[in-house]
Image (cartoon, rainbow, N blue to C red):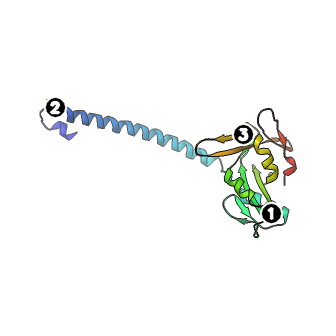
Amino acid sequence: ICDILIPNEFTRLDTIVDIVFSTAEEAKHEDENSIIEEENEKIATKSRLSKPSAFHDDCVDKFAKLKGISLIKRSRNSFTTPNKDLNVVCSVSKYHTKQNSFWFAFHPHQQDFLKQTSESYFILGCGSSEMTLALPYNKLESYLDDLWTTEDESRTYWHLRIYSDGESLLLERKKGKGRLDVSEFKI
């Protein structure tokens, strides 16, 4: 801007145009930054109001006590017995009020881990450890073809949507298959 105030030959306007253009760009970025800051504040406020679902260990402890076994944590959601003859993957979901359901994803790497042992379970924490399902992997495997999937170039996974119908828990399947009662797997 100081360059504009210094007397120059103004037959060449390139310098003035450059300054005007850069000033307009800066103003544009300031507007974008203020919008982004407003959005970040909204997200931060929302995250302070809703607790994340993180009760994996409680669900797995409940399962281990029921089975009378000890489990070693391998990652945030995968566990195995000390002799590695039983594997467990745990997934948790908050309760989705509008749909009266819980949403889970089952990934191929989880499937590979569960296939490593003859006995394995996919544990689903439905809202809290108070409502936990322990699906034997062999049962879950038989349901996979009936579940909705997401497939794109970077990932693939199955959707497990569990509806709460009073005391019953129902697994949503593809159109025409209906809901499957999985209440027998409550622990």
Q: Residues within 10 Å of mark 2 (few under 14, many from 20)?
A: few
Amino acid on which disc 1 is placed? Ala
- Comparing labels 1 and 3, the label whose residue is closer to the camera: 3
Q: Is residue 97 left or right of residue 16?
A: right
Q: Quadrant of residue 159 in the image?
A: top right
Rendered-image quadrant of the N terminus? top left
**First in sequence: mark 2 vs mark 3:** 2
The label shown at residue 116 is none
Q: Give the farthest residue toward the top.
A: 11
- Is 40 on the left-hand or right-hand side of 11? right
In this view of the protein, which residue sits in the foreground, 20 or 173? 173
CA gap, disc 1 and disc 2: 80 Å
Which quadrant, please, contains the C terminus?
bottom right
At a point 84% along the width and 51% down the height, the residue shown is: 186
Circle 3: element type: loop
Between 115 and 170, the one nearer to me in the picture: 115
Q: CA distance from mark 2 to mark 3?
A: 64 Å
At label 3, the amino acid type is Trp
Residue visible at 12% across and 35% down in the picture: 8
Q: Which residue is mark 1?
A: 64
- Measured as percent of width and height from the top left, residue 133 is found at 81, 52
Q: Which residue position is annotated with label 2? A: 12
Q: Few, some or many C-alpha atoms within 10 Å of disc 3 (few <14, some 14-19, many ≥20)?
A: some
Which residue is at 68% across, 64% downward? 74
